[in-house]
Image (cartoon, rainbow, N blue to C red):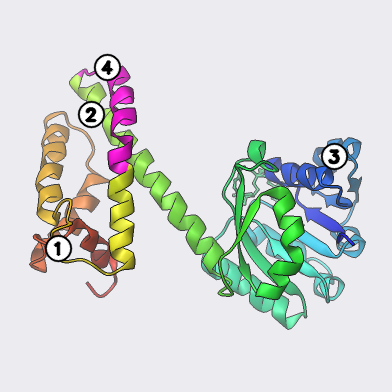
Amino acid sequence: MKPTVSVLGTGLMGSALVRALLQHRFQVTAWNRTRAKAEPLAADGAKIVDTVAQAIQASDVILMNVSTYDVGTDILRSADMARLLHGKTLIELTSGAPNDARARADWAQAAGISYLDGAILATPDVIGSEGAAIIVAGAQDTFDAAADVLNAMATSQYVGDDIGHAKTLDIAVLSLMWGALFGAVHAAALCRAEGVDLTPVMGLHEATAPVVHGLVGDFLQRNAEARFAQDDKTLASVATHYHALHHLVDVMDARGLDRVVVDGYLALFKKAEDAGQLSADFASMANFLQAST
Ligand code: NAP
Protein backbone atom coordinates (compact mmCIF):
# COMPACT_ATOMS: atom_id res chain seq x y z
CA MET A 1 0.00 0.00 0.00
CA LYS A 2 1.27 3.50 -0.84
CA PRO A 3 2.35 5.57 2.16
CA THR A 4 0.48 8.81 2.75
CA VAL A 5 2.60 11.95 2.38
CA SER A 6 2.50 15.41 3.90
CA VAL A 7 4.51 18.33 2.53
CA LEU A 8 5.51 21.15 4.87
CA GLY A 9 6.21 24.21 2.73
CA THR A 10 4.56 24.82 -0.62
CA GLY A 11 6.70 27.53 -2.13
CA LEU A 12 7.87 27.11 -5.72
CA MET A 13 9.63 23.81 -5.03
CA GLY A 14 7.22 22.42 -2.44
CA SER A 15 4.26 23.00 -4.78
CA ALA A 16 6.06 21.14 -7.58
CA LEU A 17 6.78 18.25 -5.20
CA VAL A 18 3.11 18.06 -4.20
CA ARG A 19 1.95 18.03 -7.82
CA ALA A 20 4.41 15.28 -8.77
CA LEU A 21 3.26 13.14 -5.83
CA LEU A 22 -0.39 13.66 -6.78
CA GLN A 23 0.37 12.64 -10.36
CA HIS A 24 1.72 9.38 -8.96
CA ARG A 25 -1.54 8.90 -7.03
CA PHE A 26 -0.14 9.49 -3.57
CA GLN A 27 -2.57 10.86 -1.01
CA VAL A 28 -1.00 14.25 -0.19
CA THR A 29 -1.63 16.71 2.61
CA ALA A 30 -0.04 20.15 2.34
CA TRP A 31 0.72 22.88 4.85
CA ASN A 32 2.16 26.29 4.13
CA ARG A 33 2.66 29.27 6.45
CA THR A 34 0.80 31.40 3.92
CA ARG A 35 -2.22 29.20 3.29
CA ALA A 36 -3.20 31.06 0.11
CA LYS A 37 -0.06 29.72 -1.61
CA ALA A 38 -1.07 26.13 -0.85
CA GLU A 39 -4.71 26.47 -1.87
CA PRO A 40 -4.22 26.07 -5.66
CA LEU A 41 -2.94 22.55 -4.89
CA ALA A 42 -6.40 21.55 -3.67
CA ALA A 43 -7.62 21.61 -7.28
CA ASP A 44 -4.97 18.97 -8.07
CA GLY A 45 -6.19 16.77 -5.22
CA ALA A 46 -4.12 17.83 -2.19
CA LYS A 47 -5.75 18.25 1.20
CA ILE A 48 -4.75 21.65 2.60
CA VAL A 49 -4.48 21.97 6.38
CA ASP A 50 -4.07 24.95 8.72
CA THR A 51 -1.45 23.62 11.11
CA VAL A 52 1.81 21.70 11.01
CA ALA A 53 0.39 19.31 13.61
CA GLN A 54 -2.53 18.44 11.32
CA ALA A 55 -0.13 17.80 8.45
CA ILE A 56 2.09 15.52 10.53
CA GLN A 57 -0.88 13.59 11.93
CA ALA A 58 -2.31 13.06 8.45
CA SER A 59 0.57 11.04 6.94
CA ASP A 60 3.21 8.34 7.26
CA VAL A 61 5.92 10.32 5.45
CA ILE A 62 6.54 14.01 6.12
CA LEU A 63 8.54 16.06 3.58
CA MET A 64 10.02 19.36 4.66
CA ASN A 65 10.84 21.93 1.98
CA VAL A 66 11.10 25.46 3.32
CA SER A 67 13.60 28.24 2.68
CA THR A 68 16.22 27.31 5.32
CA TYR A 69 16.98 24.75 8.05
CA ASP A 70 16.49 27.47 10.68
CA VAL A 71 12.92 27.92 9.44
CA GLY A 72 12.43 24.16 9.61
CA THR A 73 13.87 24.04 13.13
CA ASP A 74 11.41 26.72 14.24
CA ILE A 75 8.55 24.77 12.68
CA LEU A 76 9.54 21.55 14.41
CA ARG A 77 10.23 23.26 17.73
CA SER A 78 7.04 25.31 17.72
CA ALA A 79 4.83 22.67 19.30
CA ASP A 80 5.02 19.06 20.34
CA MET A 81 6.23 18.04 16.89
CA ALA A 82 8.75 15.45 18.03
CA ARG A 83 5.97 13.47 19.73
CA LEU A 84 3.70 13.70 16.66
CA LEU A 85 6.52 12.57 14.35
CA HIS A 86 7.51 9.61 16.55
CA GLY A 87 7.50 6.41 14.46
CA LYS A 88 7.08 8.31 11.16
CA THR A 89 9.56 9.16 8.42
CA LEU A 90 10.79 12.74 8.04
CA ILE A 91 12.50 13.62 4.75
CA GLU A 92 14.30 16.95 4.81
CA LEU A 93 14.62 18.45 1.32
CA THR A 94 15.47 22.01 2.33
CA SER A 95 18.85 23.24 1.07
CA GLY A 96 21.54 23.46 3.73
CA ALA A 97 24.99 22.47 4.93
CA PRO A 98 26.17 19.00 6.07
CA ASN A 99 26.10 20.07 9.72
CA ASP A 100 22.48 21.22 9.36
CA ALA A 101 21.61 17.70 8.27
CA ARG A 102 23.58 16.15 11.14
CA ALA A 103 21.88 18.35 13.73
CA ARG A 104 18.43 17.48 12.34
CA ALA A 105 19.33 13.78 12.30
CA ASP A 106 20.45 13.90 15.95
CA TRP A 107 17.16 15.55 16.89
CA ALA A 108 15.19 12.96 14.90
CA GLN A 109 17.07 10.02 16.38
CA ALA A 110 16.45 11.25 19.93
CA ALA A 111 12.73 11.51 19.09
CA GLY A 112 12.44 8.06 17.47
CA ILE A 113 11.85 9.49 13.99
CA SER A 114 13.18 7.78 10.86
CA TYR A 115 15.13 10.45 9.02
CA LEU A 116 16.39 10.98 5.49
CA ASP A 117 18.22 14.05 4.28
CA GLY A 118 18.08 14.92 0.61
CA ALA A 119 19.16 17.52 -1.89
CA ILE A 120 17.12 18.38 -4.97
CA LEU A 121 19.31 18.80 -8.06
CA ALA A 122 16.57 20.32 -10.20
CA THR A 123 14.35 23.33 -10.66
CA PRO A 124 10.58 23.18 -9.96
CA ASP A 125 9.66 23.02 -13.67
CA VAL A 126 11.37 19.62 -14.14
CA ILE A 127 10.23 17.99 -10.89
CA GLY A 128 8.39 14.77 -11.75
CA SER A 129 10.31 14.33 -15.01
CA GLU A 130 13.36 12.23 -15.86
CA GLY A 131 15.52 15.35 -15.83
CA ALA A 132 15.09 15.78 -12.08
CA ALA A 133 17.40 14.17 -9.53
CA ILE A 134 17.34 13.90 -5.73
CA ILE A 135 20.33 12.61 -3.79
CA VAL A 136 19.48 11.12 -0.42
CA ALA A 137 21.46 10.14 2.69
CA GLY A 138 20.35 8.10 5.69
CA ALA A 139 19.72 4.53 6.71
CA GLN A 140 19.43 2.19 3.72
CA ASP A 141 16.20 0.57 4.98
CA THR A 142 14.56 3.98 5.48
CA PHE A 143 15.60 4.98 1.97
CA ASP A 144 14.28 1.71 0.49
CA ALA A 145 10.93 2.19 2.25
CA ALA A 146 10.64 5.77 0.92
CA ALA A 147 12.02 5.11 -2.58
CA ASP A 148 8.59 5.20 -4.30
CA VAL A 149 7.81 8.57 -2.71
CA LEU A 150 11.20 9.97 -3.73
CA ASN A 151 11.07 8.57 -7.26
CA ALA A 152 7.65 10.14 -7.83
CA MET A 153 9.34 13.55 -7.50
CA ALA A 154 12.70 12.86 -9.16
CA THR A 155 15.13 10.08 -9.90
CA SER A 156 16.50 9.34 -6.46
CA GLN A 157 20.06 8.29 -5.76
CA TYR A 158 21.09 6.86 -2.40
CA VAL A 159 24.47 8.28 -1.31
CA GLY A 160 25.05 6.36 1.92
CA ASP A 161 24.33 6.43 5.61
CA ASP A 162 26.47 9.45 6.54
CA ILE A 163 23.58 11.87 6.86
CA GLY A 164 25.69 14.87 5.79
CA HIS A 165 26.72 13.44 2.43
CA ALA A 166 23.71 14.51 0.34
CA LYS A 167 24.28 18.12 1.34
CA THR A 168 28.05 17.79 0.74
CA LEU A 169 27.44 16.50 -2.78
CA ASP A 170 24.85 19.21 -3.41
CA ILE A 171 27.39 21.89 -2.46
CA ALA A 172 30.06 20.19 -4.60
CA VAL A 173 27.75 20.43 -7.63
CA LEU A 174 26.97 24.06 -6.80
CA SER A 175 30.73 24.73 -6.56
CA LEU A 176 31.18 23.36 -10.08
CA MET A 177 28.37 25.63 -11.24
CA TRP A 178 29.78 28.71 -9.50
CA GLY A 179 33.21 28.01 -10.97
CA ALA A 180 31.67 28.25 -14.44
CA LEU A 181 29.49 31.25 -13.56
CA PHE A 182 32.34 33.25 -11.97
CA GLY A 183 34.39 32.39 -15.05
CA ALA A 184 31.59 33.96 -17.09
CA VAL A 185 31.66 37.02 -14.80
CA HIS A 186 35.33 37.57 -15.69
CA ALA A 187 34.87 36.78 -19.39
CA ALA A 188 32.04 39.30 -19.69
CA ALA A 189 33.83 42.02 -17.71
CA LEU A 190 37.12 41.75 -19.58
CA CYS A 191 35.45 41.61 -23.02
CA ARG A 192 33.36 44.66 -22.15
CA ALA A 193 36.48 46.50 -20.94
CA GLU A 194 38.38 45.56 -24.13
CA GLY A 195 35.42 46.43 -26.38
CA VAL A 196 34.94 42.83 -27.56
CA ASP A 197 31.43 41.75 -28.53
CA LEU A 198 30.12 38.84 -26.44
CA THR A 199 28.46 37.06 -29.37
CA PRO A 200 31.66 35.27 -30.49
CA VAL A 201 32.38 34.42 -26.83
CA MET A 202 29.08 32.51 -26.76
CA GLY A 203 30.19 30.54 -29.83
CA LEU A 204 33.61 29.85 -28.30
CA HIS A 205 31.91 28.76 -25.07
CA GLU A 206 29.99 26.12 -27.03
CA ALA A 207 33.04 25.06 -29.05
CA THR A 208 35.33 24.67 -26.02
CA ALA A 209 32.73 23.08 -23.73
CA PRO A 210 34.00 19.51 -24.39
CA VAL A 211 37.56 20.58 -23.58
CA VAL A 212 36.54 22.24 -20.31
CA HIS A 213 34.29 19.29 -19.42
CA GLY A 214 37.22 16.94 -20.05
CA LEU A 215 39.58 19.02 -17.91
CA VAL A 216 37.17 19.05 -14.96
CA GLY A 217 36.54 15.32 -15.32
CA ASP A 218 40.28 14.62 -15.43
CA PHE A 219 40.81 16.83 -12.36
CA LEU A 220 38.17 14.93 -10.36
CA GLN A 221 39.42 11.53 -11.53
CA ARG A 222 42.99 12.33 -10.53
CA ASN A 223 41.85 13.59 -7.12
CA ALA A 224 39.78 10.41 -6.62
CA GLU A 225 42.95 8.41 -7.31
CA ALA A 226 45.33 10.86 -5.52
CA ARG A 227 47.47 11.16 -8.69
CA PHE A 228 48.98 14.60 -8.16
CA ALA A 229 52.48 14.28 -9.59
CA GLN A 230 52.99 15.17 -13.25
CA ASP A 231 52.99 12.03 -15.41
CA ASP A 232 52.62 11.03 -19.06
CA LYS A 233 48.82 11.62 -18.85
CA THR A 234 49.12 15.14 -17.43
CA LEU A 235 47.14 17.69 -19.45
CA ALA A 236 48.67 20.76 -17.80
CA SER A 237 50.92 21.48 -14.83
CA VAL A 238 50.25 24.01 -12.06
CA ALA A 239 52.89 26.26 -13.67
CA THR A 240 51.12 26.27 -17.05
CA HIS A 241 47.87 27.52 -15.51
CA TYR A 242 49.75 29.95 -13.21
CA HIS A 243 51.48 31.59 -16.18
CA ALA A 244 48.26 31.78 -18.19
CA LEU A 245 46.44 33.38 -15.27
CA HIS A 246 48.90 36.26 -15.41
CA HIS A 247 47.49 37.21 -18.84
CA LEU A 248 44.09 37.68 -17.16
CA VAL A 249 45.74 39.66 -14.35
CA ASP A 250 47.52 41.87 -16.93
CA VAL A 251 44.36 42.78 -18.82
CA MET A 252 42.42 43.35 -15.61
CA ASP A 253 45.10 45.69 -14.29
CA ALA A 254 45.33 47.50 -17.62
CA ARG A 255 41.58 48.10 -17.61
CA GLY A 256 41.22 48.78 -13.89
CA LEU A 257 39.05 45.72 -13.25
CA ASP A 258 38.57 44.49 -9.69
CA ARG A 259 40.83 41.50 -8.93
CA VAL A 260 38.96 40.47 -5.79
CA VAL A 261 38.28 36.96 -7.08
CA VAL A 262 41.44 36.52 -9.16
CA ASP A 263 43.64 37.49 -6.21
CA GLY A 264 42.25 34.40 -4.49
CA TYR A 265 43.41 32.26 -7.44
CA LEU A 266 46.84 33.90 -7.27
CA ALA A 267 47.08 33.26 -3.52
CA LEU A 268 46.41 29.56 -4.07
CA PHE A 269 49.04 29.36 -6.82
CA LYS A 270 51.49 31.11 -4.47
CA LYS A 271 50.94 28.32 -1.93
CA ALA A 272 51.78 25.76 -4.61
CA GLU A 273 54.87 27.76 -5.56
CA ASP A 274 56.02 28.05 -1.93
CA ALA A 275 55.56 24.29 -1.57
CA GLY A 276 57.78 23.71 -4.64
CA GLN A 277 54.85 22.13 -6.49
CA LEU A 278 54.65 24.20 -9.67
CA SER A 279 55.59 21.21 -11.81
CA ALA A 280 52.85 19.01 -10.29
CA ASP A 281 49.68 18.19 -12.18
CA PHE A 282 47.03 20.91 -11.79
CA ALA A 283 44.96 18.26 -9.98
CA SER A 284 47.15 18.94 -6.92
CA MET A 285 45.61 22.40 -6.42
CA ALA A 286 42.77 21.19 -4.15
CA ASN A 287 45.44 20.12 -1.64
CA PHE A 288 46.34 23.76 -1.09
CA LEU A 289 42.87 24.59 0.23
CA GLN A 290 43.41 22.28 3.18
CA ALA A 291 43.87 24.00 6.53
CA SER A 292 47.31 22.53 7.12
CA THR A 293 48.84 23.76 3.84
P1 NAP B 1 10.23 29.71 -2.02
O1 NAP B 1 9.32 29.64 -3.19
O2 NAP B 1 10.70 31.04 -1.58
O3 NAP B 1 9.49 28.99 -0.80
C1 NAP B 1 9.98 29.11 0.51
C2 NAP B 1 9.09 28.32 1.43
O4 NAP B 1 9.58 28.48 2.79
C3 NAP B 1 7.63 28.80 1.43
O5 NAP B 1 6.80 27.70 1.66
C4 NAP B 1 7.62 29.75 2.63
O6 NAP B 1 6.34 29.96 3.19
C5 NAP B 1 8.49 28.97 3.58
N1 NAP B 1 8.97 29.82 4.66
C6 NAP B 1 9.90 30.80 4.58
N2 NAP B 1 10.06 31.38 5.81
C7 NAP B 1 9.20 30.74 6.64
C8 NAP B 1 8.92 30.85 8.02
N3 NAP B 1 9.55 31.75 8.79
N4 NAP B 1 8.01 30.02 8.57
C9 NAP B 1 7.37 29.10 7.80
N5 NAP B 1 7.59 28.93 6.47
C10 NAP B 1 8.51 29.75 5.90
O7 NAP B 1 11.53 28.83 -2.25
P2 NAP B 1 11.67 27.47 -3.09
O8 NAP B 1 12.25 27.80 -4.40
O9 NAP B 1 10.40 26.70 -3.02
O10 NAP B 1 12.81 26.75 -2.25
C11 NAP B 1 12.51 25.96 -1.11
C12 NAP B 1 13.74 25.12 -0.76
O11 NAP B 1 14.06 24.29 -1.89
C13 NAP B 1 14.99 25.98 -0.49
O12 NAP B 1 15.75 25.39 0.54
C14 NAP B 1 15.71 25.92 -1.80
O13 NAP B 1 17.10 26.15 -1.67
C15 NAP B 1 15.41 24.49 -2.25
N6 NAP B 1 15.60 24.32 -3.68
C16 NAP B 1 14.97 25.15 -4.55
C17 NAP B 1 15.22 25.00 -5.92
C18 NAP B 1 14.56 25.91 -6.93
O14 NAP B 1 14.97 25.86 -8.10
N7 NAP B 1 13.56 26.68 -6.57
C19 NAP B 1 16.10 23.99 -6.36
C20 NAP B 1 16.70 23.14 -5.44
C21 NAP B 1 16.45 23.32 -4.09
P3 NAP B 1 5.48 31.24 2.72
O15 NAP B 1 4.86 30.85 1.41
O16 NAP B 1 4.51 31.43 3.83
O17 NAP B 1 6.43 32.40 2.57
Sequence-wise, the earlier of marks 3 and 2 is: 3
Q: Is residue 190 visible?
A: yes
Q: Quadrant of the N terminus?
A: bottom right
Task: Tell me the chief SS of the magenta region.
Answer: helix
Identify which amino acid the numbered label 2 is placed on: Leu
Q: Position of residue 17 (x, y in %)?
A: 74, 47
Of labels 2 and 1, the one closer to you: 1
Q: Which mark is residue 190?
A: 2
Q: Is residue 285 left or right of residue 246?
A: right
Q: Is residue 64 visible?
A: no
Which of the 4 quarters of the picture holds residue 117? bottom right
Per the model, the C-alpha gap separating discs 3 and 2 is 47 Å
Q: Quadrant of the C terminus?
A: bottom left
| Residue at numbered disc 3 | 41
Neighbor class of circle 2 (other Cα within 10 Å; few <14, some 14-19, many 20+) is: some
| Residue at numbered disc 1 | 272
Q: Position of residue 112 (x, y in %)?
A: 77, 80
Identify which amino acid the numbered label 4 is placed on: Asp
79 w.r.t. 127: above or below: below
**Front residue of this view, candidates 65 and 232:** 232
Per the model, the C-alpha gap separating discs 1 and 4 is 35 Å
Neighbor class of circle 1 (other Cα within 10 Å; few <14, some 14-19, many 20+) is: many
Sequence-wise, the earlier of marks 2 and 1 is: 2
Q: Is residue 196 magenta?
A: yes
Q: Which mark is residue 197?
A: 4
Per the model, the C-alpha gap separating discs 3 and 1 is 55 Å
Q: Which mark is residue 88?
A: none
Determine the residue positioned at 13% across, 35% down. Answer: 253
Per the model, the C-alpha gap separating discs 3 and 4 is 46 Å
**Front residue of this view, candidates 70 and 187:** 187
Determine the residue positioned at 23% across, 38% down. Answer: 258
